[in-house]
Image: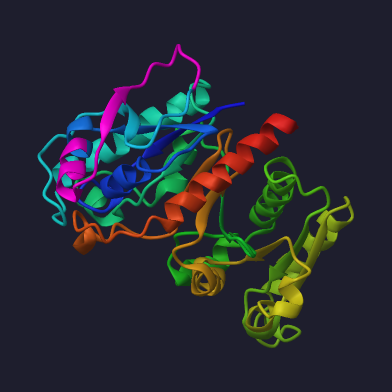
Amino acid sequence: MISRLALTPGEPAGIGPDLCVMLAQRPYPETEIVAVADPVLLQQRAERLGLPLQLLPFESDKPPAPLPPGQLRYLPVALQNAVSCGRLNPANAGYVLETLRLATEGCLANHFDGLVTGPVHKGVINDAGLPFTGHTEYLSALCNHAHPVMMLATPDLRVALVTTHLPLSEVSQAITKARLRQVAGTLHHDLQRRFGIQQPRIMVCGLNPHAGEQGHLGREEIEIIQPVLAELNSTGMQLIGPMPADTLFMPIHLQQADAILAMYHDQGLPVLKHLGFGNAVNITLGLPIIRTSVDHGTALPLAGTNQADLGSLIYAIKVAETMVRSKLNT
């Protein structure tokens, strides 16, 4: 069965449009990819890169069909202002959010089987006066305030987060029993439903150094994390921990884990990005839609230079295809 994925390029002044054009040079025999973007921007970037590109309008009433290299389907969204490679313009922030809105609504309406997102620039969106903390939070609002879970993955490691884009000073207060219960439950459920892992083994980081050292370095492990893990394990889950984060990521432990649950952003993601930067994918669990994303930023200096690395986008599409197949098989 042929699947259909929506692709949002993200920040128009960055490498996102480059990646769309470069991706269109490759065959995808089992997937139709639809760029949700300004077609003029895509054509201009293709000309700058010296790559062939024939744009074909997306028609939702027709079944998905793969395209030969050099062709790309698009769902048009008009830019507010002209784009210069590498130069941010807050006037185009609304365009970025509109591409996300249309792509997400297309997924909710079953026009698309999943969404793959390119890199956005949070700062320029906020500079435009639009509240935006990240893809994960924005997609949650579009999906009736679902409770998403951010997970990054390489071919050999998956790391999910209890908290995402928070100042470090606010992390401890945000780790409540209710939040940990919800995140761990979503992770377990989606590893089964989206990835076909029947009995996921999830290793859980402690919050404090040495996982609290029996309460001498913090009591969150004793008062919050341990009770929730015991409760969920009594229902049949396999949650191991809390474990000290500085030793959990050793190969002897990772070989036994289907995923790692980290307490905050910079506890788990530096390890994952060190292992697989450029060949990793950001996955949003807990949504009614499938969503994956690249693991890198907008790379403004590389826009229009033909030096962008396509590896993370290729992997994001591969993971989305895998998740679509798992969904169809459940």
Name the residue nearer the viewer: 172 or 94.
94
Position of residue 54 measured from the top left corner of the image (x, y, whole percent): 26, 30
Q: Quadrant of the C terminus?
A: top right
Vertical side of 291 occupied by 308: above or below: below
Q: Nearer the viewer, residue 187 or 264?
A: 187
Residue 63 on the magenta span: yes
Q: Position of residue 129 (x, y in %)?
A: 21, 45
Position of the N terminus, as image quadrant, is top right
Give, as a single range, the part of the protein colored magenta. Answer: 43-64
Position of residue 29 measured from the top left corner of the image (x, y, whole percent): 52, 34
Instruction: Residue at 58%, 33% (x, y): give it.
Output: 288
Q: What residue is shown at x 71% (from left), y 49% (from top)?
A: 191
Query: As drawn, is 57 to the left or to the right of 155?
Result: left
Where residue 263 sits, quadrant-wise, is bottom right
Residue drawn at (51%, 25%), measured in percent from left and top?
108
User: Could you tell me residue 260's position as x and y percent?
Assistant: 67, 65
In the image, is residue 101 part of the stretch drawn in magenta?
no
At horizontal 25% and vertical 51% (from top left) the residue drawn is: 126
| Residue in front for this viewpoint, 31 or 38 | 31
Quarter of the rendering containing residue 91: top left
How many dots with numbers? 0
Instruction: Name the image quarter holding residue 306.
Output: bottom left
Can residue 220 be spotted in the picture?
A: yes
